[in-house]
């Protein structure tokens, strides 16, 4: 595991009408979301890799679709600095993942259909009224980056 990253299996409670899943509980994780968004990702598309200096992301991969999630510890103060973690996430392995600052992250849609990711970050994108700089270091267009998803 990577220091500070929290992964939780999400249970689907099914009945004849469908299913329900608890996405997060405040008695299980410290989470103070400032916004929420849903992203539809086309088949084969990679989102990221990038990292935040201050923001913690709380991703929910529950379907539809499946992803390959990549995490790299880029925090020089961490006991797991330099470690990479790859995991399956989504419809066949529903999980939530808390990604603290300085953890580079990316995910690739492995499905043959558009697939959904939910995020509840603890910072507002571009700050209040979208007037601040984006807290993001992007690596996806850097061919010399060590953070690559194939």
Image (cartoon, rainbow, N blue to C red):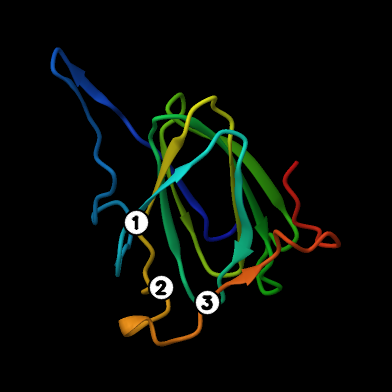
Q: Can you say whether 122 is above or below 97 in the image?
A: below
Q: Residue at 31% across / 30% down in the picture? A: 11
Judged left or right of residue 71, residue 42 is left
Number of other residues with Cα within 10 Å of mark 3, as a class: few under 14, some 14 to 19, many 20 or more: some
Q: Can you say whether 9 is above or below 74 in the image?
A: above
Relative to the observer, which residue lies in front, 123 or 83? 123
Q: Residue at 58% across / 59% down in the picture? A: 3
The residue furthest top is 16
Q: Residue at 65% across / 41% down in the picture? A: 86
> Circle 1 sits in a helix, a strand or a loop, which is it?
strand
Q: Can you say whether 50 is above or below 12 in the image?
A: below
The residue furthest left is 17
Q: Marks 3 and 2, Cα distance to the nearest angstrom?
A: 8 Å
Q: Marks 1 and 2, Cα distance to the nearest angstrom?
A: 10 Å
Residue that carries the numbered disc 2 in the rendered image = 125
Q: Quadrant of the C terminus?
A: top right
Relative to the observer, which residue lies in front, 143 or 82? 143
Judged left or right of residue 86, residue 58 is left
> Circle 2 sits in a helix, a strand or a loop, which is it?
loop
Picture coordinates of residue 73, whole percent (x, y) = 67, 60
Mark identifier at residue 37: 1
The residue furthest right is 144
Relative to the observer, which residue lies in front, 43 or 72? 43
**1 or 3: tag closer to the N-terminus:** 1
**3 or 2: tag closer to the N-terminus:** 2
Q: Residue 52, located in which quarter of the rendered image?
A: bottom right
Residue that carries the numbered disc 3 in the rendered image = 135
Label 1 close to label 2 by CB (< 8 Å) = yes
Number of other residues with Cα within 10 Å of mark 1, as a class: few under 14, some 14 to 19, many 20 or more: few
Picture coordinates of residue 58, whole percent (x, y) = 41, 56
């Amino acid at each position: 595991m990577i220091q500070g990253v929290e992964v939780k299996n999400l249970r689907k409670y099914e009945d004849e009408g469908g299913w329900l899943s608890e996405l997060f509980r405040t008695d299980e994780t410290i989470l103070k979301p400032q916004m929420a968004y849903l992203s539809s990702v086309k088949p084969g598309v990679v989102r990221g890799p990038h990292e935040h200096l201050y923001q913690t992301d709380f991703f929910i991969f529950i379907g539809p679709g499946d992803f390959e999630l990549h995490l790299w510890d880029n925090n020089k103060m961490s006991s797991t600095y330099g470690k990479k973690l790859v995991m399956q996430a989504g419809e066949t392995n529903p999980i939530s993942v808390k990604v603290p600052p300085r953890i580079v992250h990316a995910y690739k849609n492995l499905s043959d259909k558009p697939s959904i990711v939910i995020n509840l970050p603890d910072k507002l994108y571009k700050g209040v009224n979208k007037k601040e700089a984006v807290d993001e270091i992007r690596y996806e267009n850097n061919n010399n980056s060590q953070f690559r998803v194939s």
